[in-house]
Image (cartoon, coloured by chain):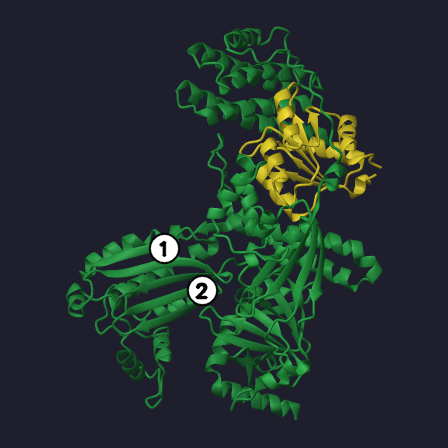
Chain colours: A green, B yellow
Amino acid sequence: MSSWDELKNTFFEETEDGLQALETGLNDMRDGNGDNETVNAVFRAIHSIKGGAGVFGYESLVGFAHVFETVLDAVRRGNLAVTSEVIDALFSANDTLGGLVAMARSGESVPADFGRNAKEALQHVLNEATDASCEDLGGQGPDSFEGIEFVPVRAEVYDEQADETHHLVIRPQVESWSQAADPLPVLQALRACGSLDLGAETSDVPPLDELQPSRPYLYWTATLRTTARVDELAHIVQPILGAFRVEIAGTPVSAEPPHLEETSSANERSTASDGSQSQSAGTADAQDDPVKPAQPPATKPAVSATIRVDLERIDRVVNMVGELVIAQAMLGQIVQDLPEQAEGRLSQVLEEVIHHTRELKNAVMSMRAQPVRSVFQRMPRLVRELSAKTGKKIRLEMVNEHTEVDKTIIERLSDPLTHIIRNSIDHGIETPDERRAAGKNEEGTIRLSADHRGGRIVIEVRDDGAGINGERVLKKAREKGLVAPDAVVSEEEINNLVFMAGFSTAEIVSDISGRGVGMDVVRRNIQDLGGRISLKSERGRGTMIQLALPLTLAVVDGMIFRVGDETYVMAISAIVECIRPARSDVAPLLGTRGTLRLRGDIVPLVHLSDIFHVNSRISDASQGIVIIIEASDGARTGLVVDELCGHQQVVIKSLEENYGSVPGIAAATILGNGRVAFILDAEELCRRSGEAGPAAARASGHGIANAA
Amino acid sequence: MPAAAALKILIVDDQLSVRTVARMSLEKIGVRLIHEAENGQQALKTASIQPLDLIISDFNMPEMDGLALLRAVRGHPALRKTPFILVTGRGDRELVIKAAQAGVNNYLVKPFDQATLQKKMEEVLGRIS
């Protein structure tokens, strides 16, 4: 099949959709359900068929569609009332149009008088229109429009249009320096408005002995030649206000109330119409999607806009995207190795490829995303059943159940969540009598919520029950030999005992939970998903269990770095910042390889060379790079590595499936040079550094021995 | 005098077949960097990611039609200058008048052939080499 034939095929498929929309719309109009949008949709369907038919040279189709569309146009302008005669004419025209399409598709020649009756009926109803708006019913209107003096506008005219020069000063604010709002997207948005001349001002930098490293002294001055007005520029810089002070022509830009402004500024705009209102306002959230519409349009398409696709097919696309990401990384490596003069144009194109791959990945991932509602909605029933069984009064609150998560995660979330809620009802929430005695509301509350937080999805189950009875847990753990009789155990460690295999504190093993196969299985399930579970409990006040899960299972943005000869990857979402610390900021702490003073905070350091037993090229954190990572509970740790190699998307290859689970390593990936690298588990590394005392000391002993 | 191979052009039409025919015409003219969008919203997104030398948009599209797209482009500080050719049906004079008022650079009547397309483009961009 030639490509032209294929195109014709595409056209006929689109035409089928159009005919279907047409029929649906006409039915609605006949039944009196048709509003303006229905008539518009019908008009558009015919108009599209006409347009496409013209492109592919089906003249009889074009001619008939033109008369058909003229009638609809009269209807939507209110020039023609929808009488039963009109409806009859439209339906017969619909049949004729379908017939003409079928003949065009099969290549039959159209009989001379085909559809004459329908055409006459249309012309007849048109005569009754109040304004015989369309003079040339032949459908063969002129290519140029007589009576209109249309002068094409040369593109350059816009360039010469009164460009104004604006002077901007963009200055980081000391108070919010650590908030780290990224100014780059905003600067790019400004550059897109015209020609931008950006310079760094160094005049505020004090002599060295007065310099405070944590204070920002540099700022930017920008000269922008653009057609954009001051209020539009003020709008563009909104995302960084707070972290930056922005002046336009000496006047500081003030923060706009985020939503109120959208409508008012759009209304002021003389050129703005319905379409552009939602549009122009979107510039503020400039990051990935500068012109995201404020609201999705409320119109519903006449033809169903969803199709059902086998998950297997989507997964094939996911896999291909993964392979594409790897191939792209390889290409990137090759481009990087080229001599500089050869790579210029190529790396530009590569940038585009990277951009599109990222979009592609996001698009594919969003196909797999589903709202957590599908799991959440099984819980009310569970709560009802259990509350009937236990005689406890329980109210279930569900928050943000529309949060979207990868389908695989959703599927494997059901069991752990059921376990947790069972536990909560069985052990957490007290009986109405107990609750009354404790001065609480008789009715206990379980709150189930889902949130996106730092590139992860965090699901919380919070109850206002009795909390964990620390003494009982500890007693039980000692009985079972899980804790040495003389060990001193912190409250947090007691809470974590709940997750140990074979642990159950229920005095009476109920048939709801407490068979001792609960929480350790839950933890295992969540860890298998690349997630982390944590528990906080307050005696008498309740318990909160938090699940932090990755958003997707296939591709992540990764930071690549080297320790000795080994290359590792850390998910960007876990990284707070990367720094090369000053020697004076690295303080030894007894029994560890040191801590880092970071803007007033103390961050424990972990030398990856110790954990993975590789020979590092550096002996001290100040010679290398420290990657500050953050766990989902907010704990920070500095990873000491030799050097950073770059940032790229990496495809996650499961370690568990192919080898087995290794603590501290989340998965593996394939790099641009074809080598396998490990993706590190930020949660585990943070946890290790937190509890590390003795372990780190041992490790450091090992490291020193190596160095010696 | 722009070189065809360096032009970045966005075709907006809800029909894949029509977009593809337009793409083929552009390719015959020598244009290499051709983006496509199915509707106004998508077009704005594409346009905001990279600067374009020309938008060729159909009028008749669901949700955000070509005229609304034109107005959005002209009202958008970063996209305002992008040259815009609106594709109309035969005999649609009112639309051409509205588009001219909204700041369209040129119009094209559907169906158009490669020569007409090139002529209309050159009226806006200057002679294409």
Image position, residue A381 (x, y; %): 28, 52
Image position, residue A76 (x, y; %): 50, 20
Q: Residues within 10 Å of mark 2 (few under 14, many from 20)?
A: many
Q: Nearer the viewer, residue A252 or A485?
A: A252
Image position, residue A325 (x, y; %): 65, 56
- Tell me the element at label 1: strand
Q: Nearer the viewer, residue B16 or A596?
A: A596
Of mark 2 and mark 1, the one earlier in the sequence is 1
Real-space CA distance between mark 2 and mark 1, rounded to the nearest whole angstrom:
16 Å
Check disc 2 and report the residue beneath it. Answer: A548
Q: Residues within 10 Å of mark 1 (few under 14, many from 20)?
A: some
Q: Is residue A510 above or below residue A688?
A: above
Q: Amino acid at mark 2?
A: Ala
- Residue A424: quarter of image: bottom left
Q: Are marks 2 and 1 on the same chain?
A: yes
Left or right: A400, with A396 as reference point: right
Q: Is residue A510 above or below residue A283?
A: below
Q: Amino acid at mark 1?
A: Val
Q: Chain of mark 2?
A: A
Residue appearing at x 69%, y 41% in the figure = B81
Which numbered disc covers residue A399?
Answer: 1
Residue appearing at x 58%, y 65% in the figure = A572
Q: Quadrant of the N terminus of chain A?
A: top right
